[in-house]
Image: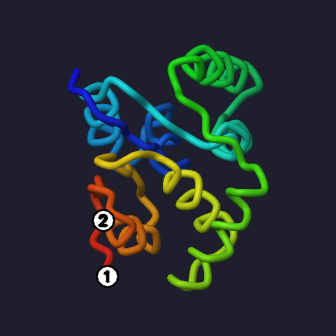
């Protein structure tokens, strides 16, 4: 594993747990990094998103247990008033919706250099402008 911080957005983290395009990229980026970071929002989002992709209650139980078991490996950024205020600034500056702005505001609390792993196209230019090395399989211009 390499040093440094890797902020993992929900769109990317979901790929860690389900077979979907770009799963290998996500797994490799996470395994190559020693410190994973996510917001408290990400934990809630990932658990809810898994409900939409499972085929059985048993599969959901296994996936939830896996996420909860790995969550202790994450540094968790709180969604507090400071984060909410910064999300307003970022959302306004980059024309983002609430969830994307909250993810970027949480990540923006990290010291640089840091990397930002996402599969949300609209987050890419904002993350880059905020000083992150962006890891994504998507092109922000498409």
Residue 95, picture quadrant: bottom right
Residue matched to label 2: 138
Do callouts 2 and 1 mark residues in contact (Cβ within 8 Å)? yes
Residue 43: x, y in percent?
A: 67, 37
Judge whether 117 appears above or below 56 on screen. Answer: below
Circle 1: is it few (<14), some (14-19), or many (20+) Cα within 10 Å? Answer: few
Residue 109: x, y in percent?
A: 52, 50
- Label at residue 142: 1
Assign a secondary structure to mark 1: loop
Assign a secondary structure to mark 2: loop
- Label at residue 86: none
Q: Quadrant of the C terminus?
A: bottom left
Q: Taking the image as drawn, is residue 52 in sight?
A: no
**Residue at point 49% right, 36% down?**
37
**Residue at point 72% right, 49% down?**
79
Judge whether 105 appears above or below 3 on screen. Answer: below
């Amino acid at each position: 594993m390499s040093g440094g911080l890797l902020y993992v957005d929900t769109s990317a983290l979901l790929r860690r747990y389900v077979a979907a395009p770009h799963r290998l990229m996500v797994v490799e980026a996470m395994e190559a990094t020693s410190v994973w970071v996510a917001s408290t929002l990400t934990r809630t989002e990932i658990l809810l998103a898994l409900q939409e992709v499972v085929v059985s209650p048993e599969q959901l139980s296994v996936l939830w247990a896996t996420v909860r078991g790995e969550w202790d490996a994450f540094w968790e950024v709180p969604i507090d008033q400071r984060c909410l205020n910064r999300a307003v600034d970022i959302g306004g500056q980059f024309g983002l919706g609430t969830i994307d702005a909250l993810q970027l505001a949480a990540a923006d609390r990290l010291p640089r250099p840091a990397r930002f792993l996402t599969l949300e196209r609209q987050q890419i230019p904002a993350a880059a402008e905020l000083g992150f090395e962006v890891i994504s399989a998507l092109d922000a211009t498409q």
